Image: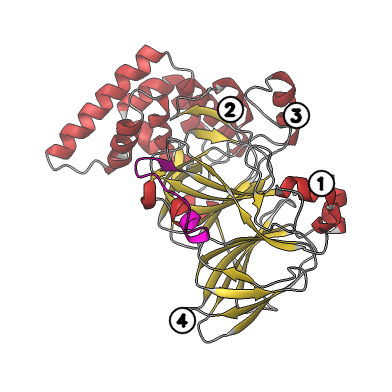
Amino acid sequence: MEGVRVFPLTCAVQNYSWGKVGLDSEVAKLVVGGDPLAVIEEGKPYAELWMGAHPKGDSQIKDNRIAQTTLGQWIAHFPACLGSKVKDSFQGQLPFLFKVLSVNTALSIQAHPNRELAAHLHSQFPEHYPDDNHKPEMAIALTHFQGLCGFRPVEEILGFLKAVPEFHALVGNEAAEELRRGVGDADRTKRALKKCFTRMMNCEKKVFVDQLNMLVKRVTEEGAAGKDTSSSNGELLLRLHSQYPGDIGCFSIYFLNHVVLDPNQAMFLGANEPHAYLYGDCIECMACSDNTVRAGLTPKYLDVNTLCEMLTYDPAPSAAKMFPAVPDHSDPCVSVYDPPVPDFTVMRIQVPAAMKQYTVAAVDSASVLLVIAGDATATSAAALSDVTLRRGTVLFVSANESLLLHVTSAAGVTMFRACCLL
């Protein structure tokens, strides 16, 4: 039924083993909020909520007046809902995948390929690389959120090479010396950093397991003796080692920035940027792809050579990884996270308690709206009937449709909206 162009969705949940368990998970809480009859199993991880039309987790349409059962099918029938520019630029596909992640144990050390590499990997190894799209992504913290992201400033890496002999042993004297000599010369630094990282990642299993065990023993003993272990990044090392014992990824903490986000702070991860999420809950938006090249902190398929070849070896402080939200000049309730890729933009909409009515403005793109807090009733000519919004409600809004919210909760309403602003 084409008359209905705004409708609620039931979204796919991914129960990956690293997710927070039961109702500790923000994903599980949102699922129950959106559907009070949903059953959450106590011992089960609820890792990701997928809001979009990716074939691995296509959202179901919650409107029995619509013949198509999934969002992907509906968009295929009515591609004009995407907005004309988006439809033409992205071949009639929704260009982004919107997610909520609840991270309990670290995700793998990974990077996502650019379009060219994605096409190559997909054609050669379709079982490991399921599509040919790039996957830039942005994470916006919902709770205190920790991750590893991008290479640290060289001075910090050199500091760890000096303070952590076990780490130095894996990199080797020659590569470590090259990194030291390259300081101040960007090209030399890049080449040396690549050599250091590749040496470590390709280290013989027995060698790195021995070094890791020595390091863990040393840091544990120092900690027990009340010594400060921060020069070895001791606390994070022990946490990762307890989650993934004997994994080379434990050493990546000496190369990568430890980024900590407060709620509503964001980081953007472009193609070929090394990263791993460690703990917390976030909103994530990305190009519509599931391509990931992994090299540690995971039992999954490892592709160390591809990862070492593809990474951007651009050392920068963790503050450089933070991605600011910009206030929307036309609407004081909106903050915009607009990354340097065309595929997606995310808006945070915070309607204050004093505002009883609020219009979600039309944009020239299909969008997905997630309610994080608060209650409201939404009316839209394109919905044909009122939609109740509460924590966990997910709405699909066709291009160029607006919504009028009647806010019913005392604390106002907080929402995130993903769209594509070409």
- Neighbor class of circle 4 (other Cα within 10 Å; few <14, some 14-19, many 20+) is few
Measure how far apart labels 1 and 4 are at the Cα level.
40 Å
**Mark 4 or 2 closer to N-term?**
2
- The residues colored magenta run 30-46
Residue matched to label 3: 119
- Neighbor class of circle 3 (other Cα within 10 Å; few <14, some 14-19, many 20+) is some
Residue matched to label 4: 410
Q: Amino acid at mark 2?
A: Leu
- Neighbor class of circle 2 (other Cα within 10 Å; few <14, some 14-19, many 20+) is many
Which quadrant of the rendered structure holds the N terminus? Answer: bottom right
- Which percent across, then down, holds residue 353? 50, 82
Residue 402, quarter of the rendered image? bottom right
Q: Secondary structure at mark 1?
A: helix
**Mark 3 or 4 closer to N-term?**
3
User: Which circle, 4 or 2, is nearer the viewer?
Assistant: 4
- Which percent across, then down, holds residue 248? 41, 25
**Mark 1 or 4 closer to N-term?**
1
Measure how far apart labels 1 and 2 are at the Cα level.
35 Å
Q: Amino acid at mark 3?
A: Ala
- Which percent across, then down, holds residue 80? 86, 56
At horizontal 70% and vertical 36% (from top left) the residue drawn is: 114
Q: Secondary structure at mark 4?
A: loop
Measure how far apart labels 3 and 4 are at the Cα level.
50 Å
Nearest to the observer: residue 317 or residue 270: 270
Q: Secondary structure at mark 3?
A: helix
Which quadrant of the rendered structure holds the C terminus? Answer: bottom right
Marking on residue 76:
1
Q: Is residue 132 above or below residue 279?
A: above
**Mark 1 or 2 closer to N-term?**
1
At horizontal 73% and vertical 73% (from top left) the residue drawn is: 380
Q: Is residue 327 above or below residue 74?
A: below
Q: Secondary structure at mark 2?
A: helix
